[in-house]
Amino acid sequence: MTDAQWEVLSYEGVIAAAVLYFLAMLAYFFELASLRTAAKVGAEDVELATVAARPTGASSDAGAGHAAGASRRTEVAGRLGLVLTVFAVLVHLVALVARGLAADPNRVPWGNMYEFTISGTFVVALIFVLATLRIDIEWLGPLVTTFVVAALMAAFLGLDDAVLPLPDALNSPWLVIHVVSAVISTGAFTIGALLSGLYLVKARSTATTGYLARVPEPKVLDRLSYRMHAFGFPVWTFAVLITGPIWAHQAWGAYWNWDPKEVWAFITWVVYAAYLHARATAGWRGRNAAILALVGAATLWFNFIGINFFSSSSQHSYAEGAAPEMSVVLGLAGPVEAAQEVGVVVGPDHPRA
Amino acid sequence: MTDLKPDLRQRPSDDRQATALPAELTARELARWSWRQVTSMRTALVLLLLLALASIPGSVIPQDNIDSLAVSQWRDNHPRLAPIWDRLDLFDVYGSVWFSAIYILLMISLVGCIIPRLFVYARALRAKPPRAPRHLSRLPESTSYTTDEDPDVVLARAARVVRGRRFRVHHVEGEDAVAAERGHLREAGNLLFHLAVIVVLVGVAAGSLFGYKGGVILLNGDDYGFSNNLTQYDDFAPGALFDPDVMEPFSFSITDFDVDWLTEGERAGMAREFVATLDYETEPGGGTETYDLKVNHPLTIGGTDVFLIGHGYAPVITIRDGEGEVTKSGPVVFLPTNAQTFESFGVVKAPFARPQQIGLEGAFYPTFAMGRDADGNLTMPSSIFGALGDPLISMSLWTGDLGLQDGSASSVYVLDKAGATQVMKPNGQPFRMDLRPGESIDLPDGLGSVTFEGVERWNKIQISRTPGKLVALAGVVLALLGLLASLFVRPRRLWVRARRQDDGTTLVELARLDRSSGGDPEDGAAELADVVAQLQDPTRTGTSNRTSRRTSSTKEDES
């Protein structure tokens, strides 16, 4: 297959995966909806049996049959959601591989924002699917699929970019190690944030039906969230404070440059460090820790997308297409005193490398 | 023996609390109280959050040591705010007093928190596992069974089994219970992490105090060389305690520079695979070696690293003055203003030209083309490709005082126009010369002539020496190892009690206490079930089975 065909295949794969995630989302929503009616029917049933005190077998049997049917539907919908998610993850993987093969020379599929987003969402979905094998977390399905669908749509609409070969600075084994670890921890933190958000909502909720009733106790949510963060934090440390500086040293000549991307990665690290401490501090456990986790996720995603719009000097801004980047790093990066003295206006063309 | 309260699940050392200010204070008490405040976990938390918050301005406001060009532009655009920003150190956030204050306080807090915990840990390492609480069944994770075996037999086996599970076991003959504990590595990891943070800071501080970073623009070719001493740098940023004697006496020249320009496909115009071939000597008189300097492949000489940072063109220009003398001849470094097309800007000065000084200012286009707007009308001249396709210089001409006579420092990249006047054509338009290599032009008013001989290349080389970088790296790696231990080692205690009951059978009670905050109740129940299975069937080795895990996992959820 030619590069162009691979590229088309990748786009088709991403679209197909998005559609599958969307269907999975619908299945999960259907599950939630029927969960609600099932709970209602069940409750009415009990009311009928107790309040009206009519122990005639026929009617309560019918009610029970109704409830059983509803709960079977619920279960089938939930299963369907998970199965669809699994298929979506597989198709998503194919799309990622095709994206890598579409480049010339072949490379890892995270050379720009679009690619980082489709890789990141893949990891979010993959972590969710893997987690369902080990722990009872399928109730997170609606949130995960909604998030992934939204992120994929945003990637498609706002971040799409041509398959360009990597600029020299990115052409390093560290691209694989550094970005893989960043993507994995981003996925873990994202799921952790969903859980912490859910914790905050659940802790205030007294709902006996619907989604929140299905979600486990706040205590369990808090623990699951902690475990996601405990997994993500060392990986993030590895990405940001070990591989990042090593690579920066090789490519830019200094292991820490206070580049805006670095600053925000550091901020994220500090906030999550605070989260881990908060969980062990009286008065900060629970609610405040969960808020910190959400703040951490906000800094994480702001760093990924937002900072590019605030600072043009970041050597990490890959939003503008890959072409000018290398020449930029080679062109004007570093303290080119000369250029500053000339007052060269590096206006719109300023290489956002 | 006391009953265990639920908060025993929390390690006491985690909860260094800020305490209320005592009503009446001696100086000593005040000092103690302050110390306790500073080293409390809550203060550490607040300081962490402050550190995160304080880092933000530096990512939004341009920073002097990162992008001083952006800083000067910002100053020009905000003349009223700039002095205030200056006073607040907002152009140098990460070197500012207030930023330093936060992280120094954080370090003090960390040290104050860690040192007492080191002693606590040392004591805990020597201490025996705590004795069994009286009512094991009250613990959140507990189970029991009855057997006909003698209690002593059960306890002896329990000690063996639990020891086999790598618990530290305490069992005194005559006591009715076995106490066991494991997972001390968690706190060890925790301490290691925090100590390693200090190591990282020491490494980073060493780098910024004793190190330096400098840049030089070096023309390609054997004729141009660089030797590593202060005078040779174009820009140089030493650390506060930098000593020039540590500079290693190497020298190098760039014999060749190669760029791979893509000429077709949607990537056309992009360049990659920059290779500068370096001939270098590690010390004067030493043998010459060759190195292919590339992005991501710095050259390390001793403790100094040499990086390829940029490249550009240097048109070779000869200026003859009005008396026919060559007053300027050679390559002149032009700085790229467009990182992709390498349209470049530069000035040429001939201050000794007679009768008048000559200054040129203008652009260099590696591949010249006239821009066209949508209607096909010619617009601005431009470069359409970064490689040397159709090189052209387009310069304007200045005469008069170029400001080089009074001996004050001036940039070679800027034409001082204060005392100079631009030469005009008779029709009032500025005089311009557009030259391709080999072409010459006679200047008006008998000023002389300019010849564009050809084009050479230059590379921007960055040279830095960062002592302590391996210390910092080792620190981060240690911190990561400590972090892994502190997050994933599960400290826990286990007790087994066996008592003869009135009916002659033996009641065996087991309880487990998870002392980490992220433990799974399922895992705890599984471990208990495993131990029970091993006690009941001595031939069985410890493999967990999932059925017992499922059945006994409900207990925790109730608690």
Image (cartoon, helix red, strand yellow):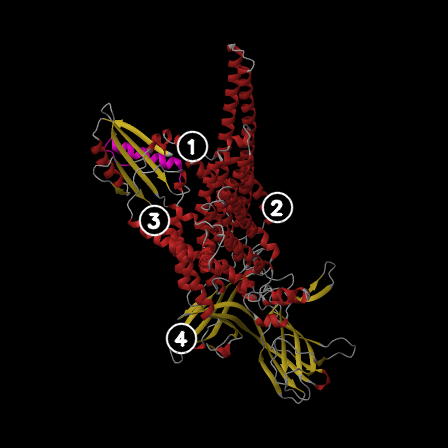
Q: Are marks 4 and 3 on the same chain?
A: yes
Question: In this orientation, which residue lies closer to the viewer: B408 or B79?
Answer: B79
**Drawn side of residue B37 relative to residue B159, left or right:** right
Q: Which residue is mark 2?
A: A157
User: The residue under label 2 is which amino acid type?
Assistant: Leu
Q: Which residue is mark 3?
A: B185
Question: Which sits earlier in the primary sequence, circle 4 or circle 1?
Answer: 4
Give the distance between the C-alpha atoms of the residues marked 2 and 1, in whole angstroms. Answer: 45 Å
Task: Kindly identify which chain the residue marked by label 3 belongs to.
Answer: B
Question: Which sits earlier in the primary sequence, circle 1 or circle 3?
Answer: 3
Pointers 4 and 3 in contact (C-beta within 8 Å): no
Q: Verify whether residue B225 appears in magenta.
A: no
Quarter residue B322 falls in: bottom right
Dot 1 crowding, Cα within 10 Å, few <14, some 14–19, many 20+: few
Is residue B24 something one can see in this rendering? yes
Q: Element under label 4?
A: loop
**Closer to us: mark 3 or mark 2?**
3
- Say above or below: B209 vs A278: below
Dot 4 crowding, Cα within 10 Å, few <14, some 14–19, many 20+: some
Q: Element under label 2?
A: helix
Is residue A94 something one can see in this rendering? no
Range drawn in magenta: B519-542
Q: Are marks 1 and 3 on the same chain?
A: yes
Task: Kindly identify which chain the residue marked by label 1 belongs to.
Answer: B
User: The residue under label 1 is which amino acid type?
Assistant: Asp
